[in-house]
Amino acid sequence: MKLFAGILNISAAGKRIAIIDEQAANLLGVHSSDRILLSCCGRTAISIADVATGYPSDRIWLYLEIAEALKVKDGDALEVTPAPMPESLSNVRAKLRGERLREDAITTIVEDVVEQHLSDIEISAFLTALKVYGLSMTETEALSRAMVETGKTLNFGKPPILDKHSIGGIPGDKTSMIVVPIIAAAGFTIPKTSSRAITSPAGTADRVETLCPVNLSLAEIREVVKKTNACLVWGGALELAPADDLFIRVEYPLGIDPLLLPSIMSKKKAMGATHVVIDIPTGSGAKIKTPAEAYTLAQDFVHLGKHLGMTVECALTFGEQPLGYGIGPVLEAQEALNTLMGRGPADVRDKAVSLAGMLFEIVGIENGRVKAAAMLRSGKAERKLREIIGAQGGNPNIKPEELPVGTEKAEVRAQENGRVLWVSTDGIVQVARAAGTPKEKGAGILLKAKLGDAVEKGQVLFEVYAERSSKLTAALEMAKKLEPFGLSKKTGERMLLDRFPPKTTSPRRESHFMLER
Amino acid sequence: MKLFAGILNISAAGKRIAIIDEQAANLLGVHSSDRILLSCCGRTAISIADVATGYPSDRIWLYLEIAEALKVKDGDALEVTPAPMPESLSNVRAKLRGERLREDAITTIVEDVVEQHLSDIEISAFLTALKVYGLSMTETEALSRAMVETGKTLNFGKPPILDKHSIGGIPGDKTSMIVVPIIAAAGFTIPKTSSRAITSPAGTADRVETLCPVNLSLAEIREVVKKTNACLVWGGALELAPADDLFIRVEYPLGIDPLLLPSIMSKKKAMGATHVVIDIPTGSGAKIKTPAEAYTLAQDFVHLGKHLGMTVECALTFGEQPLGYGIGPVLEAQEALNTLMGRGPADVRDKAVSLAGMLFEIVGIENGRVKAAAMLRSGKAERKLREIIGAQGGNPNIKPEELPVGTEKAEVRAQENGRVLWVSTDGIVQVARAAGTPKEKGAGILLKAKLGDAVEKGQVLFEVYAERSSKLTAALEMAKKLEPFGLSKKTGERMLLDRFPPKTTSPRRESHFMLER
């Protein structure tokens, strides 16, 4: 059936939606929410049909996403037919029955996700089944490959191409901003893409953006890497493994993360990485709770890397508290800069040097840690980061204290004498987000005490920064409710850990879900 | 934030969708596809927000479903805020982790489904998790209760209230149209609601609709039952267990049916049934393949019935071929009428008398089968059906041959001599649907041979009826492809059952999914 396009300036989070009149729908035999196939000028795309009544029956109204996919203009004639059942749906159904999927079956699913042929219902069922049944290594590998093949890829010339990635899990982790310049300063290529925060106070892209633009095109990235051996850019708009963003949109409300491995590894593969270090923060408040889990995951990363043609090594790192003292985009960028300038906290420095050292060693350099420390101490790494900042369009001479921290500030103090027994990463994350992170870049938390520190009653445990007073108030209320610091006279003397039912309906009980990876 | 309503005449299959401008969305901190809470004149409802650009920022456009939920008119002022996370989502997440849910957790989920607070993504994940992990009896019972409590219920006065239900699975099953008048003719109350076909050639509502209206209001149903002890109506618009329709919408594309038990039993409970017979057709082409599966399911039905305060007995019935000879709304109504008039096929008569007999026995009548047969033989059951037809607004004196069968007709003949070794229920269903059932009521199939019959080459196996010649052609093509009849000289002499890969890409290989229940 031929229908004439009307373009609506409406978007639905990537979903392709078209509205047709009841009369046209009846002629097509299409019901509301059915899939229809649209063709125009040699392009075809599948859309969800919503059905309107009392509108002209020779028209079809397109949301932005489908209009862009078809590149149609107002008034263009579209050929409209009911869409056939997507080929991949029978593979999704096989997974629901618990079958192991073959590579070609996985490929059709990922292709249909990227082409938007599968609905939210179907993608959700697929991811839930993966979460419940688990993935075989064959499936994991096939998913990784399919996610690479349905997206763009980069080639930076001759190997090795290095990369570093954290699976996420503890706030304040600004390691990439230090590891990347250490590696690049030694002459190796390390084109680092990273994500923005989804559920955390800051992603690497949010941190770096306080220093320079991160939303670069593929051509610009190539230029920056050519000049500096490195980059620190946002990967979100590069269409590397675009299936992943579509999966994340569905995983987020469900609080499940079955695609951790293929998601990370497909993006490394798309960037052409040959040698990768994966950081697995391990601790009761991290994504990975125990060393046993961490080792299993590490094994899978190494194994998958081998299948995809990459040398992978994993670092199990201490994940019982935030890394460093600053949490929030600006506060973290300051701390990273300070660390490169030789005045950062010991834990940040140690983690960066350890991970950079592992990277050096997997490309064949002995005593990698020593080399990494030398790059830091000599100031070469600092100069390299400033070079990258300049190449990406920022001010290479920026001083940490010039970055604008939120002007609204308050202090949270100890209620008693004691030692810091635990710091709740969940609690810190939620207070920082209540303060306005990641959107308000100057918002955040500056810790004034960490695990094992002795504090006196009235001493400041942490400072909260915000850009608006209403957010500061919200953050302080959250801090009061969650009490992210646990103090004790001496470990093991305070026997009552918690009470049930809880004395407040505190969000601390609702386990905080981290999707960043 | 206050926004002024604009009503769009657009529906999205029950989903509540509102469109706001980018500026308003930014002020609210809402992204496309987020949930927003709308309030107006004491009513509140949650909607999905789509985001438009370049529209007036003080307006909000409402799809029909949300406009109706709020009962707003064009220009009404709405209070709009970001919606809190639905309470039930943490329960859905718990199910994804494999936890057993308590009754109150299940109740919040069902309530939020009915109130449309949960998205397709979340409902799909919940149903997939139920399908994979299975349901405990406590969960099944809680789901049944919650589905009853979130819908309307009926009370027909003093017990017993009888009911009969088939879990579905074989085409041509017109038993309810015979059992209901047999029971009512004996003075018992049997208010039967039924569904329309989703994936089959006809549901009981489709069959009865060829004789009289089935879309009655609750008040009209009460009137009909008062007059005749019975009714044969469509349950779809009565809002008995409305959650079920919302679940079915999600289950359908996935081909899963985890809610078989609570779906059926909640509807029986909502109608006030106290004594129920459940028919479980069992056979290789039916929903339940083996007696072992059937016994397990039967046990669950009986158990669940006890918990819900109903006496339930299950019938395992022969499900290896269609029931009777007619398939399609009119052809089945004819056959049911003929059976009541003493001239129906033996299998239809036997099944109806058996099930009616079981119903008599569970309310304390001895030799129920004898009593059922007597009701049939005496013509009392026929008179009762005509009474019901009249009370529901149809012609009580209708003759079977007056019902309009499709005028387009063709015959499918045997290609060789032999005995009917098998009849594919899947194949028959697909040919009948290609012919136009259930929408075109005169379309369908009239079998001319059944299991064990000897046929000669060229003899008619079945007739296909359609209302349009294009559908007849499609049905004949389907018949050619699927070959729903298997003939053999003598059982066991033809050794090659099938070949792989298949010689055609026949839809016979794609297991046909039956959602009717």
Image (tube, coloured by chain):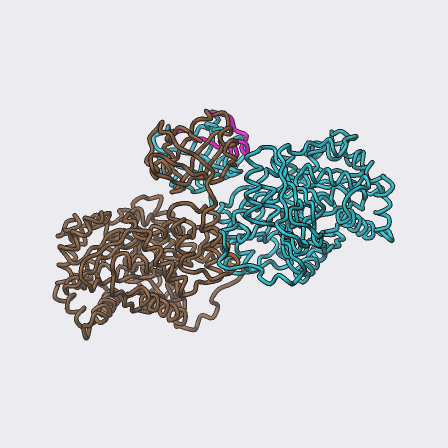
Chain colours: A cyan, B brown
Q: Is residue A25 above or below residue B486?
A: above
Image location of residue A338, percent across then percent down: 77, 39
Image location of residue B130, percent across then percent down: 46, 59
Q: Is A324 part of what is drawn in magenta?
A: no
Q: Is residue A411 left or right of residue A396?
A: left
Q: Nearest the camera: B166 or B439? A: B166
Q: Is residue B295 above or below residue B111?
A: below
> Taking the image as drawn, is residue B486 in sight?
no
Q: Is A58 part of what is drawn in magenta?
A: yes
Q: Is residue B446 left or right of residue A277?
A: left
Q: Nearest the camera: B303 or A67? A: B303
Q: Which quadrant of the view contains residue B180?
A: bottom left
Q: Is residue A208 above or below residue B281?
A: above
Q: Residue at x 63, y 37 (%)?
A: A465
Q: Quadrant of the C terminus of chain B?
A: bottom left
Image location of residue B372, percent across then percent down: 18, 68
Image location of residue A312, percent across then percent down: 75, 53
Q: Which quadrant of the view contains residue A156?
A: top right
Q: Quadrant of the N terminus of chain B?
A: top left
Q: Nearest the camera: A509 or A214? A: A509
> Taking the image as drawn, is residue B103 in sight?
yes
Q: Nearest the camera: B340 or A415? A: A415
Q: Is residue B482 left or right of residue B204?
A: right
Residue furthest bottom in the image: B366
Task: Give the number of callouts.
Answer: 0
Magenta region, residue range? A56-75
